[in-house]
Image (spheres, rainbow, N blue to C red):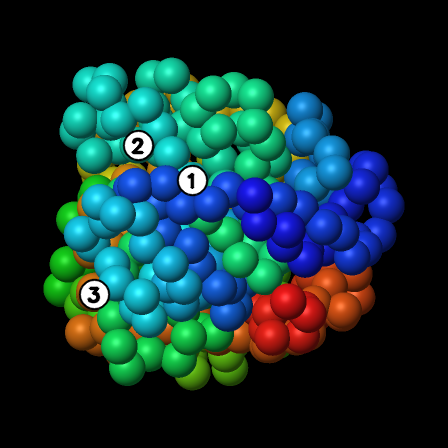
């Protein structure tokens, strides 16, 4: 086993502190990464504070990982020592069920192995995430990071990127479509970039008027304040597709009213409580309310290659690991544009 420095939440609602974990030596199909950067996802806070329940402690968060291959197993063909690689929200699945066979490992019928706050497929060995100096993973669940992109800004693509790219692809976002992005945060800013790159006419909807300048800088063609009730009358029946990134309580019915006939609203944010939806909000106009999680391994690689082709990365603020608790508090206040990324060089090997 490889003794590995990390930062962990040793119990719910406790600050993250230095911690030591053990990584397995690479098996025949594994690679060992030296972690260079790890993005900080809002879900890291939810899980480190056990707000979703079922937390496994001590917990080492982090599922937006970019690193350099340090060692490869004897049967590895996808990577060689020195390559750049990424790890997203999962590190394994059964690989044999129908869902895995269709490329949807995230929905593995036996339950995928989360990168952290989960277990390996043996259902016993805890998984630890990217707030650490190295990680061992099967080559199947590692992504090839294209050259030419800033590595710190690539890290959030492994979660925020694929979370917004996937629904735009699923619902065939294309030139001429009218797309609304609800919320301008870690997810929303990526949704704007992707939808614009696909040729859509993009409108950003936010409760913060101060976000307008940033929305336009990111490429949005229009901005509307969702605190203003007149917005929902003015934009009624306008959009083909809505990407809803908001995790705070809000009224889905109001946003469904912004869809054109046969339009789709895709939820990628997770409000803390159930949101009531009136049947007439869907029936009137044959509208669809859908959800989307992350993508499978093949789609995530497709997304990274797309980003390289179109020069798309996240807007990030890089921090040392020692500032992670401060970063959590700033995220809760919305004080980041738009993703914190940890430089793991600050974690002694």
Residue at 26 percent of width and 63 percent of height? 80
Q: Position of residue 297 (x, y in %)?
A: 27, 44
Q: Mark 2 against mark 3, which lies toward the viewer?
A: 2
The reply, left or right, for residue 226 in relation to residue 312 is right
Note whether residue 292 is visible: yes
Residue 105 circle label: 2
The reply, left or right, for residue 254 in relation to residue 174 is right
> Which part of the image, by quadrant, shows the C terminus?
bottom right
Cα gap from disc 1 to disc 2, whole angstroms: 8 Å
Q: Position of residue 98 (x, y in %)?
A: 20, 18
Residue lying furthest left in this view? 175
- Check whether the beta carbons of the residues at disc 1 and disc 3 lie within 8 A of each other: no
Residue 306 circle label: 3
Q: Is residue 204 above or below residue 286?
A: below
Foreground pick, 195 / 230? 195
Residue 90 circle label: 1
Foreground pick, 106 / 20? 20
Residue at 25 percent of width and 59 percent of height? 79
Cα gap from disc 2 to disc 3, whole angstroms: 20 Å
Q: Position of residue 20 (x, y in %)?
A: 72, 50
């Amino acid at each position: 086993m490889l003794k590995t420095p990390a930062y962990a939440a040793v119990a719910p609602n406790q600050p993250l502190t230095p911690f030591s974990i053990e990584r397995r030596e690479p098996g025949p199909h594994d690679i060992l990464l030296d972690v260079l950067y790890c993005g900080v996802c809002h879900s890291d806070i939810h899980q480190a504070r056990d707000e979703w329940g079922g937390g496994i402690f001590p917990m080492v968060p982090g599922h937006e990982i970019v690193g350099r291959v340090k060692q490869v197993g004897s049967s590895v063909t996808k990577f060689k020592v020195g390559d750049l690689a990424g790890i997203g929200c999962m590190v394994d699945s059964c690989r044999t069920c129908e869902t895995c066979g269709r490329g949807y490992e995230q929905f593995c019928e036996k339950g995928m192995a989360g990168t952290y706050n989960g277990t390996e497929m043996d259902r016993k060995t805890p998984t630890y995430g990217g707030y650490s100096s190295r990680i061992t993973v099967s080559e199947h669940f590692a992504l090839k990071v294209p050259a030419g992109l800033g590595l710190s800004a690539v890290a959030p693509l492994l979660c925020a990127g694929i979370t917004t790219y996937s629904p735009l692809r699923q619902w065939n976002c294309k030139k001429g479509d009218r797309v609304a992005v609800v919320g301008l945060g870690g997810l929303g800013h990526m949704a704007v970039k992707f939808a614009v790159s696909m040729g859509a006419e993009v409108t950003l909807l936010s409760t913060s008027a101060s976000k307008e300048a940033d929305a336009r800088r990111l490429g949005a063609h229009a901005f509307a304040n969702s605190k203003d009730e007149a917005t929902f009358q003015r934009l009624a029946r306008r959009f083909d597709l809505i990407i809803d990134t908001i995790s705070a309580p809000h009224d889905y019915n109001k946003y469904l009213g912004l869809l054109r006939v046969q339009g789709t609203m895709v939820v990628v944010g997770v409000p803390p409580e159930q949101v009531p939806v009136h049947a007439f909000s869907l029936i009137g106009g044959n509208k669809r309310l859908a959800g989307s999680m992350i993508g499978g391994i093949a789609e995530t690689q497709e997304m990274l290659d797309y980003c390289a082709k179109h020069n798309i990365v996240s807007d990030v603020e890089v921090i040392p690991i020692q500032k992670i608790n401060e970063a959590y508090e700033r995220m809760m206040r919305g004080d980041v544009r738009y993703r914190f990324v940890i430089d793991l060089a600050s974690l002694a090997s």
